[in-house]
Image (tube, rainbow, N blue to C red):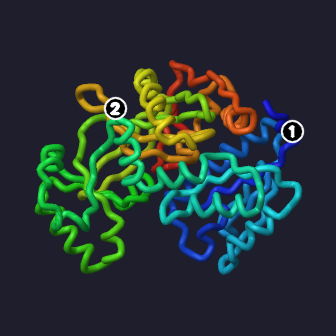
Amino acid sequence: MHNQSRLKIWVCEYVSAGGLASEALPASLLQEGLLMRDALLADLSALGVDCITSHDSRVAAPIHAASQPLHPGEDADAFWRQQLASDDVDACWVIAPETDGVLQHMQQLVQAAGKVWIGCSAEAIAQTSAKSVMAEVCQQAGIAVLPHVFLAQVDTLENLSWLHAAAKDGWVVKPDDGAGCEFTFYFKKISEVYDFKLKISNENPKLLNKLLLQPYLPGLALSMSVLSTQAQVHVIAGHQQKVNIQQRCFHFDGAGVNEAAAYLPAMQTLAEQIHPAIPGLLGYWGADMILTPDKQLVLVEINPRLTTPYIALSQLLTENPAAMILDAMLENKLSDAQAKASCVLSLATKTHTELLPA
């Protein structure tokens, strides 16, 4: 493994680092971001890595990094460019949402500074940030993926019979580039979808063009944590997501980290299908899927970045997860470590104060 004690890494968790310094902070995204930030910094600190970052002046500075406050009204990009200009920064590790191209923008910011990017390639980020593009790429590779149409096209499509056949249990409307359950709705009848479309077209016509319509697929909501080099891919843990529907809205209530370990062989097969289809998936990435009643995995989305279960991985894995990711990125070496089969943690997003043993 690369000698991490000689590394200085700029770590940026977009929300807590000041990306929304001039806006109201969304509580759930902030809490989730802080937990991921602190887990990553703790893992890097355990390796002897020196980290620098920034923090929104409204939140606490991290313990395991030298951090500068970013105040409301300050230009976050200019602030970060100044930090990146330091000769001491060897590499950059960014956690940011794909929504509105934020993750792509951050990758470009790091690239322009001439620093090493720890994460998926620009091409992979572009292919996975839009669910519609990801689905087309994966479908062409023979991967089972949720079908979709853009909500704005529903009236103009002459034949929706193929989609109707897949939507025996209802319909889902979600943003093409959304994260998690953000602005995701369930409708039992297609007439309800048309009513929703009319409402959105009147209130926010620009948003309408970003919304997808998909069939609702019953089953278990699962996700996986994956490590990749250019040549190899390895699923290190499988998780069960706690998702419920309240008043037509989807809500993410946490995850049973490593709770889906029984499905690791099927997840590994899926990861081995995804990896050559999107070869720029490097280091750590995640994917969400549905396990159908007939035990088939259907891909829902790919996240080309750290995902929420990372928070618990250092407690589950036999190796430091940050070390494993750095090995994959800097040494092109993949560890075969994975979560201990008997170890499961429940990550409850409603409290975000502790990890509760299952």
Upstream in the sequence, badge 2 or badge 1?
Answer: 1
Q: Amino acid at mark 2?
A: Leu
Q: Is residue 222 left or right of residue 208?
A: right
Q: Is residue 78 left or right of residue 102?
A: right
What SS does tag 2 mark? Answer: strand
Residue at horizontal 35 percent and vertical 75 percent from the top: 206
Identify which residue, 21 or 128, lies in the foreground: 128
Q: Is label 2 in contact with label 1 (beta carbons under 8 Å)?
A: no
Q: Residues within 10 Å of mark 2 (few under 14, many from 20)?
A: many
Q: Is residue 212 left or right of residue 21?
A: left
Identify which residue, 235 or 148, lies in the foreground: 148
Q: Which mark is residue 5?
A: 1
Residue to which mark 2 is pinned: 297
Identify which residue, 33 or 235, lies in the foreground: 235
Residue at horizontal 44 percent and vertical 37 percent from the top: 223
Provide residue 64's location: percent of width, then percent of height.
Answer: 77, 48
Q: Residues within 10 Å of mark 1 (few under 14, many from 20)?
A: few
Q: Which image quarter: residue 72?
A: bottom right
